[in-house]
Amino acid sequence: MAQIEEVSFERIKHKKKMATEDLIFYIFNTLFLLLFALVTLYPILNTLAYSFNEGNDAVRGGIHLLPRKWSLRSYHEILFERPGIRVGAKITVLRTILGTLTSLAANALLSFILSRKKFLFKSSLSLFWIITMYASGGMIPVLILFRYLHLTSSFWVYIIPGMVSAFNVMVMRTYMQGIPDSLEEAAQLEGAGYMRVFVSIITPLCKPVYATIALFVAVYHWNSWFDAMLYNRFDPQYTTLQYELMKLLDSVSATTGASSSSAAQMTQANANTITPITVRAAATIATMAPIVALYPFLQRYFVTGLTIGGVKE
Amino acid sequence: MENSITKSKNIKEVDINKPKFTVKEFKRQWILVAISAVYVVYGIIFYYLPLAGWIMAFQHFVYAKGITGSKWVGLDKFKFLFNDKTFLMVIRNTFAMGVLNLFFSTIVAIAFAILLNEVRTRWFKKSIQTISYLPHFLSWIIVVAIVHDALTSTGIINEILMKVGILKQPYAFLGDPKLFWGIVTFSNLWKETGWNAIIYLAAITSIDPCLYESASIDGAGRFQKMLYVTLPGLRPTIMILLLMNMGNVLNAGFELQYLLGNGLVQNVSRTIDIYILDWALDARNLDYSLGTAAGIFKTVVSMTFILGSNYIAKKRGDERLF
């Protein structure tokens, strides 16, 4: 495909259609895309600079890409002086690993069943799950249910309820349907049962889609805070990293956010009692670091995954 | 039987392949049936029981008394809801921000995909794309922290505007109700444009290159090709994504508004989900029944949107969901 495009491009070039209009377009397009990249990256780099700056100095603002007064104080604080963040980090890592593994297994098995052409209840079971994508009971019935089930005030509320997701199942099922039936039939002739077919034939062929779904689920777990707030508000031993970050954000915006409007003097007076902007910046950087570090390597997986799930659905 | 299936496969796949219900077949795939039963039980507990919880909206639900012990109040909760000025306000806010978001995110993502597609330098294209979908993987908390930092009195936006001379003093962007919807829309664009563009880029590469060839032979310029070849080629993708997102219009307003909102802008920032959450968390006026009723309203409207847009798409002969 790319070759053909290039050939056609060459031909246009030979026809000397590469006029000044084209050149102007290229320049503006490049500039625009560079601006886009700048707008995307600048805030992140700015946060990075703040996180390495000294706390009281940072309140003055005016820090761009480099810290003005270097200090590792903020990182020291989030690593050693804030027990909440440590607990949150532990719970987040635990739920990311456990949640991803269980969810992947549960979604894969259901997708396998739904992608068997001869399965007797294929259409009714599909419908059963598709309905769950659109009709949801809502926040409060779910909360009440979890309380009845004793899932609130527990770690398991992060793992069990979200284990099967109809959307992920549909993506995986679409992928599995693309695997030729002859493989399954051959294995069955050799005496393999359904579970054997799932483990030894389908699973090895589904690695790309498994990787994609695992990535989505892992990012979801890493980034979630709302369930920690709704179900485990009074249980600091089950807090998550993002929820801790949210509390930091709240304490900063409660003061500096309002500072520009009403409470400017108050902010100055309270500068030492509130969470300094640099601590929050350090926590933000620490929270996004694993994702930023891993994601260039995982890129190809989510691009393929999205294309399977979106275009074919 | 095997034979008949393979033979007729080419003619009509779905119907012929449908297995016949026989005891023998059932026994052969008993393990699939058994596992499905587990999934059905799981699905009933976690997805269908909450739907049954909708009856709470017709009671004055008290947790200690349970569903069986709470007093029935008929439609009182719904009556209260539609007479509540705050509820009507949050509906307006949710719709406004949902529609703004849907409209701008679609247009900007398509524009970005088309512009990126015009880049011929591979490494440049690749790097821009990699950078563009990084924000999708950051949490809303981080995005809000970033937006907040950019817009405070010492933030970059105030700094630039003051240097250029548009502003004399730092302006409190986050405290201005007129700007809130715009800030929310822009934050959404910042986070999701690159991600949303992936699917359009994939769709552009699948457009037949011959179309571009013949267009240029006919004398079409770059912009004409974008307008008359690329855009029509994207039409099915645009339609199906619009359809999928229609049902999400009301879901688009929670985390960002909850985290970015503050007392000064609460009349424009609060959405249906935040309204529901308040009834569930505020210890002083806890009312699970009202929250449930508001949730029912939201789900019913979303379903109507999906079914309605699907029906329209069907009539017009476009792509559709079901």
Image: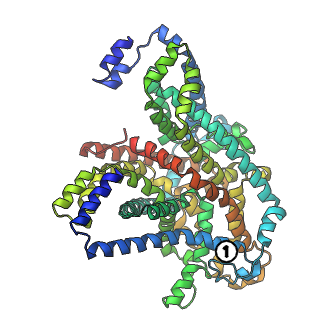
Disc 1 marks a residue whose amino acid type is Ala
Q: Residue furthest top?
A: B24
Q: Position of residue B265 (x, y in %)?
A: 55, 71
Q: Residue furthest front?
A: A14
**At 34% from the left edge and 22% from the top edge, which residue is drawn?**
B15
**At 74% from the left edge and 43% from the top edge, which residue is drawn?**
A155
Query: How many other residues sit within 10 Å of disc 1, few (<14), some (14-19) or many (≥20)?
Result: many
Say if residue A238 shows up in the picture: yes
Q: Is residue A93 above or below residue A264?
A: above
Element class at badge 1: helix
- Residue B282 horizontal side relative to residue A3, left or right: right
Q: Is residue B282 above or below residue B321?
A: below
Q: Position of residue A150 (x, y in %)?
A: 73, 38
Q: How many numbered marks are there?
A: 1
Q: State which chain disc 1 sits on.
A: A
> Which colour assignment does the render follow?
rainbow
Residue matched to label 1: A49
* Residue B117 in which image quadrant: bottom left
Q: Nearer the viewer, residue B153 or B178?
A: B153
Q: Quadrant of the C terminus of chain A?
A: top left
**At 68% from the left edge and 60% from the top edge, which residue is drawn?**
A287
Q: Is residue B75 above or below residue B257?
A: above
Q: Position of residue B213 (x, y in %)?
A: 22, 56
Q: Is residue B3 above or below residue B202?
A: above
- Residue A81 horizontal side relative to residue B253, left or right: right
Q: Nearer the viewer, residue B6 or B166?
A: B6
Q: Residue furthest left?
A: B218
Say if residue A253 shows up in the picture: no
